[in-house]
Amino acid sequence: MIPELFAQKSITQDERMQWWRDARFGMFIHWGLYCIPAGEWKGKEIPGIGEWIMKRALIPVAEYRELAKQFNPVKFNAHDFVATAKNAGMKYLTITAKHHEGFAMFKSNASKYNIVNATPYGKDVIKALADECHKQGIKLCFYYSQSRDWNEPNGLDNDWDFPAQRDFQKYLDEKVKPQLTELLTNYGPIGLIWFDTPMTISKEQAQSLKDLVRKLQPECIISGRIGGGIEPDYASTGDNAVPATIIPGDWETPATLNDTWGYKKNDNNWKPAEDVTRLLFDIASKGGNYLLNVGPNSEGLIPEASVKILSKVGDWMKINGECIYGSKASPFTVEFPWGNITQKPGKLYLGIFDWPKNGLEIEGLKTKIKKIYLLSDKTRKAIPFKETYDKTFDHHRLKIDLPSVAPDKVLSVVAMDVEGEPQVEEAICQQADGQVYLPGVLAKSMKGDKAVKLNFSSRGGGADNWTDPSTTLTWTFKVEKPGVYKTDIVTSEKGSAESPTWQGDHLVKVSANGQEFQTKIVADQKVYNQRSHYWSKIFSNGGTLKFDKPGTYTLTLAPVQFSQGKLGFTFREIYLVPAI
Ligand code: H79
């Protein structure tokens, strides 16, 4: 029998995820040899994300490896990297230990193609970062590309330099596993391993990587893209993709600050600090973490523009961090036009980026409010509010008399002390401005008499792969103000961030309250979506519907015929807008 003392205590999933759930905000660092060409090869600008330059310019291995001989990032300062993350309010740092190019940013005995053995710099930047992270209390995590390796004949995806025949298992055994072992043995406790682009890795192969991580560091989290159908510890959305609604479970959006991960000298398309701050709040409101990227250059510096943006986000976090760290998703499933909501036990936080001039009304919140105040107000002066309940309509309304000017033009946080767990009415309610918002995720989706599930969580928040016209959506909602309503049917762009695409021309039928119309999905209006950057919302004006008395109604959206194309119907939501 094993004495109690020696029995190893196994860690529960909740224990493993705790620090990560509390963190909500982390720094991604894409740093490798690609920062030297910085988006340009032999005088020619190479389009696309910078760390893909080897493949996009089909650079032969022998030529690309020469870059290592020039790599001398003498201005690198681990303290500054970690301090930049910390000052922004980030709690963890995930650095590319090896990206698809195959070059290791750490000392490796498994491959001499690494920063210590193959460059004039000759120092292990990962070691320096590990020491600093421990000093400054930031979790150190590693990105490791487990399947693609353009430097290895047996790694996947270099089809311009190596024969098609490859022994992927040999590559896993001789490079990936030894390097993961080095990463998980030589640098102290590691927060998580960020696998990426699994490609054709098999179930057994992916499982063997997971087993290795678990064996070496049972507390280490395994991120979403391990592949092979293996259960990760949390889900990763598509790159830069912010879902339109709450996603249950643990998830993270990896995102760029400009349009590349690895440094590109000509990419100055920086996202404003305002957008980044709002996205941070919005992602937390939907239950996720925000992993935000910087791409250091060949001197070893994080671009000045990135540092500036992060420092502004940090200023906001210093005042408002309470509504982010350790927060949970909004009690409402959907986002609001004015902002979004996070919660903690006994608290709701309204993150408002579109400040209403005449106070804010929240429909359908059943919870008793004790006190409302601005998070930025140190005196916590009470803001007047009124909660009402309409019995005949079974409807709860909260009216908050906000000051007329937003305390923070980026994102003001209104904190509410509440009694018990926040509860929300089940039926969709009409908003204060008269609009009714019918998001896909709140609909009942049916194929004949069978319930089916559509996924609204990826790029642009529109339905993924809705190519079956026999699937219909039905909503139940309350209309308080009778009248005629215009309909806007909103779809989203999809595809890669580099070239978003959209498919229209579907014929759909909308029916409600004994009326119906057919309409073709066309792009009447394209609206930039601050919450998903690359993928705009497309508004298609439908017909009108009349709701003649207050009450509960249903509306059904049924495809009649879909146009030809891969994307299908990327439906997001319907707006019912009072026609005046
Ligand atoms: O590390 C970052 C990316 O390099 C990596 N994931 C994030 C975190 C990533 N690897 N692959 N992908 C993302 C999928 C992207 C494929 C594309 Fe392309 C690269 C689309 C455009 C550039 C290759 C080249 C496919 C089309 C053109």
Image (cartoon, rainbow, N blue to C red):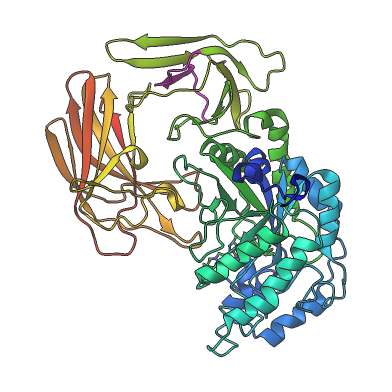
Is residue 571 shown in magenta?
no
> Percent from the top left, x then y, of residue 318?
73, 32
Which residue is the extreme one toward the left?
A: 514
Viewer-closest of 396 and 516: 396
Q: Quadrant of residue 440?
A: top left
**Residue 442 in sight in this render:** yes
Q: Quadrant of residue 165?
A: bottom right
Residue 480 higher or lower than 97, as above or below = above
Q: Which residues are magenta?
A: 354-368
**Residue 48 in sight in this render:** no
Viewer-closest of 92 and 523: 92
> Percent from the top left, x then y, of residue 508?
20, 48
> Percent from the top left, x then y, of residue 395?
34, 16
Residue in view at x 51 percent, y 53 percent: 237
Q: How many marks?
A: 0
Viewer-closest of 472 and 188: 188
Q: Quadrant of ligand 1?
A: bottom right
Is residue 366 shown in magenta?
yes
Q: Is residue 226 left or right of residue 321?
A: left
Q: Is residue 328 left or right of residue 367?
A: right
Q: Is residue 348 left or right of residue 478?
A: right
Q: Quadrant of residue 373?
A: top right
Residue 499 higher or lower than 171, as above or below = above
Viewer-closest of 147 and 358: 147
> Percent from the top left, x then y, of residue 570?
34, 52
Which residue is the extreme one toward the front?
A: 1
**Quadrant location, the C terminus:** top left
Residue in view at x 64 percent, y 68 percent: 51
Residue 453 higher or lower than 442, as above or below = below
Magenta span main SS: loop
Residue 90 higher or lower than 418, as above or below = below
Residue in view at x 72 percent, y 56 percent: 217
